[in-house]
Amino acid sequence: MLKGLAITPPVIGRISIGKIVEKHGKRLPEKDDQFSITSLMQSASGWLPHPLDESLRKAESGKPAGKLRSIPVRLLFNEADLNLRADYSLFDRKTGRPICVGNGETCRRLTDGGITAMDCPSPDCCAFGEAGGCKPYGRLNVVIGDEDELGSFIFRTTSYNSIRSLSARLHYFSAVSGGLLACLPLELRLRGKSTTQSFRSAIYYVDLSVRSGSSVEQAIGEARELDARRRAAGFDQAALDAAARIGFSNGAFEDSIEEGAAVAEESYPEAPETSDRSGERDSESGERGASGEGAHQTGPDTSATPATPGVTATGMGTPGNRTAARRAGSRNGSQNHSQNNSKPSLLDKLDGKAAALPGKAA
């Protein structure tokens, strides 16, 4: 096995509840109120629909153009954390290269000297992560249909609501079924809610449940029957889980640089919006979240700014004094620019931003 390369489940399609749109000359993530199932091919207008997208829309609403808000799925693995991998991630917005990935306790960070293990205090308490737009990032692999039992569709998200809900459901279903997650007939559901932080507007997240018209008891019964048939046929689910575990641990980061361009565009936009901790501005894209959630932004550090006569801390003063202050600032900026001809690296920029944020652990 090639070392340093994470071996991830084969992906044959994407699931998303968001998309990329062009506004004012920029490509920005936009949320949606329905699922989209796409292939791995793109055109100038975006990702091409997968054939299953149309068939599932017809089955749910009776119309090819109906809204898709539930998807019947099965899982690949019995272990919950193999189906859904979630961590705090920071990506280079230009190259899509992973820079820092952590779990809230420890992280792996790309430095000038290579990949280094460090403490991870989570984005809210990490100056390095806050400066770079670190956020939760989850990847869920599911099986749709029976055409390829080991080929999966991937749903990627940066929503706290989706990650929290999916993680809870996976662990609960694993517990009540006796660890038969891979045999349970389940369904991805799109749910909505409104909060004061979303200004009463609807936000959408992804949940997991037993299929419509079925109870948990019925689903467990079907899972036991399928598990018995697989065992009789020689299907070794424990070995499959072990192989997946080894594959994920084979690389420092799960996402490759090749995939990273979509990560940066859809989940880590160039000009992120201020977001809240509870993920109230959710919307995700299957490939890379299209979450619309940005890094927490902080105001400029004015502690080292020299005082200008006639100008108060709030920038008020006489027109003449304000003009003088602007000219002085312009001269100072020109001098500083001429003294710094070399362009700092992205890591230098992040370290500089982190140093300017008081009370944060880098």
Image: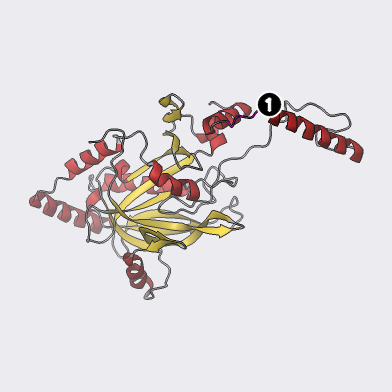
Viewer-nearest residue: 22 or 137: 22
User: Residue drawn 26% across and 61% down?
Assistant: 145
How far from the left and from the top, in percent, is residue 86?
A: 39, 41
How far from the left and from the top, in percent, is residue 267?
A: 48, 48
Q: Which residues are magenta?
A: 339-344
- Whether residue 204 is visible: yes
- Whether residue 164 is visible: no
Q: Residues within 10 Å of mark 1 (few under 14, many from 20)?
A: few
What sort of colour scheme is used for the picture?
Answer: secondary structure
Magenta-colored segment: predominant secondary structure: loop
Q: Height in image: 40 above or below 261?
A: below
How far from the left and from the top, in percent, is residue 123?
A: 51, 35
Q: Is residue 74 highlighted in magenta?
A: no
Q: Height in image: 32 above or below 319?
A: below
Task: Say left or right for 181 vs 352.
Answer: left
> Which quadrant of the structure image shows residue 22?
bottom right
User: Residue drawn 60% across and 29% down?
Assistant: 342
Q: Height in image: 17 above or below 80?
A: below
> Looking at numbered disc 1 in the image, what kind of residue is underneath it?
Gln
Viewer-nearest residue: 78 or 20: 20
Task: Say left or right for 247 vs 227.
Answer: right
> Which quadrant of the structure image shows residue 245?
top left
Secondary element under disc 1, as helix, strand or loop, is: helix
How far from the left and from the top, in percent, is residue 341?
A: 64, 29
* Residue that label 1 marks: 339
User: Residue drawn 21% across and 40% down?
Assistant: 243
User: Residue drawn 38% across and 57% down?
Assistant: 15
Q: How many marks?
A: 1
Viewer-nearest residue: 168 or 261: 261
